[in-house]
Image: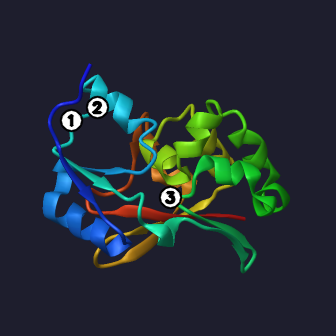
C-alpha cells in the first residue's frame, strides 16, 4: 500500500518543530525514525496531512550523565543507546532491553522518543521507562513540563502528549 498524500516539512530546531505543530495542530505528525509511523501510514491507519521531519534537529540527539540522571535526547537512535558506555554503566536495564528491539537496521533508524510517543505498551523502551519511572521532558511553545513515565502512558497506543507538544528528553534515575 501507499500512504495518503501529505505535505513534508523538514525542520532544524525544536522551535521549528513547535512552530509547525502550532500551525498544523492535529493534522501534523512528527517523523524521526519512522519505524512505527511509516508502516501505519502505508496501511492508512495514520493519515497525517503534514509530516514534520525532525531528523536535522541535533539539539535533541544526546546521551549524557548529569546531576544524578542519565539524560537522553528524544531523537537519539536506539543503536546509539545500545552502543553507549554511559547507558551500559548508568542504566544496564535499558542497555539490555534495547538489544531486543527489531534488528540492527531497525535500531539504526528508530529513536527513543519515537518509541515512547508511539505508546505501544508492548515496546521494550516503554516498559523500561515505566519500570524505572523515567522522567519525560515535554515542550510546547509556551512551557516545558516533566511527566513520570507511569503518568505519560494513557492507555493502549495512547500518551498524554498534546498536539502542539514535542518530547525532547528522557531522564533515567
Q: Which mark is residue 62?
A: none
Q: Secondary structure at mark 1?
A: loop
Instruction: Point out the tag, 1 or 2, that comes first from the N-terminus.
Output: 2
Instruction: Mark 1: give few (<14), some (14-19) or many (20+) Cα within 10 Å.
Output: many
Give coordinates of residue 85: x percent, y percent.
81, 60
Q: Is residue 113 left or right of residue 56?
A: right
Q: Are marks 1 and 2 in contact (CB under 8 Å)?
A: yes
Say which quarter of the image contains residue 38.
Answer: top left
N-terminal-most mark, 3 or 2: 2
Mark 1 to mark 3 CA distance (whole Å) = 22 Å
Give whichever of discs 1 and 3 has the lower sequence position: 1
**Farthest residue in the top direction?**
1
Q: Position of residue 99 (x, y in %)?
A: 72, 38
**Foreground residue among 77 and 116:** 77
Q: Which residue is mark 2?
A: 41
As measured in the structure, the alpha-carbon distance from the residue carrying label 3 to the one carrying label 2 is 20 Å
SS at circle 2:
helix
Residue placed under numbered mark 3 in the picture: 75
Judge the density around disc 3: few (<14), some (14-19), many (≥20) Cα neighbours within 10 Å.
Answer: many
* Quadrant location of the C terminus in the rendered image: bottom right
For the point 51% across and 44% down, the residue is 115
Tell me which residue sits at (50%, 53%) in the image: 113
Q: Which residue is mark 1?
A: 47
Secondary structure of the residue carrying numbered label 3: loop
Answer yes or no: do the residues labelled 3 and 2 have beta carbons within 8 Å? no
What percent of the width, then of the height, locates residue 15? 32, 74
* Residue at 70%, 33% in the rendered image: 100
Amino acid at each position: 500500500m501507499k500512504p495518503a498524500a501529505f505535505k513534508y516539512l523538514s525542520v532544524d530546531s525544536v522551535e521549528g518543530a513547535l512552530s509547525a505543530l502550532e500551525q498544523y495542530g492535529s493534522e501534523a505528525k512528527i517523523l524521526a525514525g519512522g519505524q512505527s509511523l511509516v508502516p501505519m501510514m502505508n496501511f492508512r491507519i495514520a493519515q497525517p496531512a503534514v509530516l514534520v521531519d525532525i531528523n536535522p534537529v541535533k539539539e535533541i540527539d544526546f546521551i549524557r550523565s548529569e546531576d544524578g540522571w542519565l539524560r537522553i535526547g528524544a531523537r537519539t537512535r536506539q543503536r546509539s543507546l545500545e552502543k553507549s558506555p554511559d547507558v551500559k554503566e548508568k542504566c544496564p536495564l535499558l542497555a539490555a532491553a534495547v538489544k531486543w528491539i527489531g534488528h540492527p537496521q531497525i535500531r539504526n533508524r528508530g529513536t527513543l522518543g519515537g518509541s515512547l510517543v508511539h505508546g505501544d505498551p508492548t515496546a521494550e523502551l516503554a516498559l523500561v521507562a515505566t519500570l524505572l519511572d523515567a522522567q519525560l521532558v515535554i515542550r510546547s511553545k509556551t512551557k516545558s513540563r516533566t511527566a513520570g513515565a507511569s503518568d505519560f502512558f494513557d492507555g493502549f497506543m495512547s500518551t498524554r502528549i498534546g498536539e502542539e507538544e514535542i518530547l525532547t528528553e528522557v531522564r533515567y534515575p
